[in-house]
Image: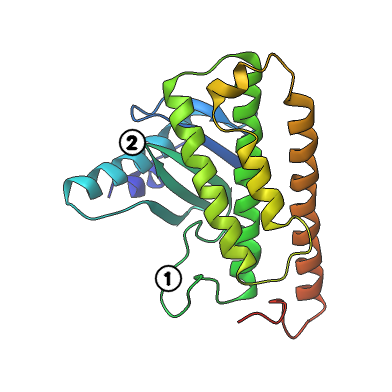
Amino acid sequence: MGILKLFAKPAPVVRKLPVGSFTVDRDGNMMTTTVGSEYPQWLLDDTAREVLSLFRDARAARMPLTGLDLNFAGLHITAREMQGGALVFLSPQNTFVALIASQEGTSTGIKRPGQLIARIESHIGCWKQFNYFVNLARAKMFGLEDESNFLELKKIIELDAETIFAVIEVPSPTSEETIALLARAPSLCRLSETDGGDFPGLENAWHKLYTGWHSVLGRIKIQRRDGAKSLFGGKK
C-alpha cells in the first residue's frame, strides 16, 4: 500500500503537523488550499499522490470508494473523491474522524459525541473551502476543474449539513440558511459575472454561517467537557 511508504520513508522533521484542507486535480496538481504555507510542500504533494492512487486502484478494482479516513504518524487524513481529483483534510490525529462516517447501525453514521464534533469540524472545513472558491470567482482566476470541484463541494456541504441537523437541534445556522447561501452561488462562472455586485452580501452571509458553526462546535465541546448526559438535542 503506497501510502504506508509515504510515512515510513525518511523525511525532514515536521515540528507541527498541518491543519487545513486542499483540492487537487486528477493529476495531483494543487488547485486550492487552506493549509498554511509554513508546511512543507512535499508533504502535501505526497499525500495527494497517495490519496489519488487509492481512488484509482479502487476504480480499477470496481470497488466504489468515494471517501477515505486514514491515520498515519500522528496525522489524520480524510478525503473525498471529486471528479477524478480529491478534496483532502489534514489535521493532527484524533481531531477529525471520517468525513464520511460508517453507515452501519444508524442512518447518520454519528454514534458518539467525538464523531459529532469531528463531523462539525470537517463541515467547517468545507465552508472554508467554499469561501476559497468564491474568492477565485471574484478574482476571475478559475478553470473548468475548479468549477467541477466547486459544484461537488456544494453537494458535500448540503449532505453533511443535513446529516448534522438529523442528529442535533441547531438553532442557527438553519437548514434554510444553508440552502439559501448555496443557492446564491450557483457556479463560479455565474459569480464571476456579477462584477462584485453580490460578493459583499454573499461574504456577509457566509461569515454569519461560518461563525455560527464555530459557535455550535464550541457549545458542544463545553457540554462534553462538563459531562452532559446527551449532546444530541433529544434526537435519536
Q: Upstream in the sequence, badge 1 or badge 2? A: 2
Crowdedness near tag 1: few (<14), some (14–19) or many (≥20) residues, C-alpha within 10 Å = few
**Kind of residue at disc 2:** Gly
Q: Residues within 10 Å of mark 2 (few under 14, many from 20)?
A: some
User: Residue sitting at 61 percent across and 36 percent down?
Assistant: 130
Give the vertical position of 13 relative to 199 (above or below): below
Q: Which mark is residue 210?
A: none
Mark 2: secondary structure: loop
Q: Residue furthest bottom?
A: 229
Q: Quadrant of residue 27?
A: top left
Q: Is residue 37 above or below residue 11?
A: above
Q: Residue shown at 68%/53% (left/top)?
A: 176
**How far across and down, in percent of the image, does residue 149 sit?**
46, 34
> Could you say which disc has been placed on residue 103 in the image?
1
Label 1 sits on a secondary structure element that is loop
Question: Residue 102's quadrant in the figure?
Answer: bottom left
Give yes or no for contact between labels 1 and 2 (Cβ–Cβ under 8 Å). Answer: no
Residue 29 screen position, x and y as percent: 42, 24
The residue that disc 2 covers is 84
Res. 13 visible in picture: no
At label 1, which amino acid type do we have?
Gln
- Report how far apart the C-alphas of labels 1 and 2 lie in the structure: 24 Å
Identify the residue shown where x is 57% and y is 49%: 157
Q: Is residue 9 visible?
A: yes
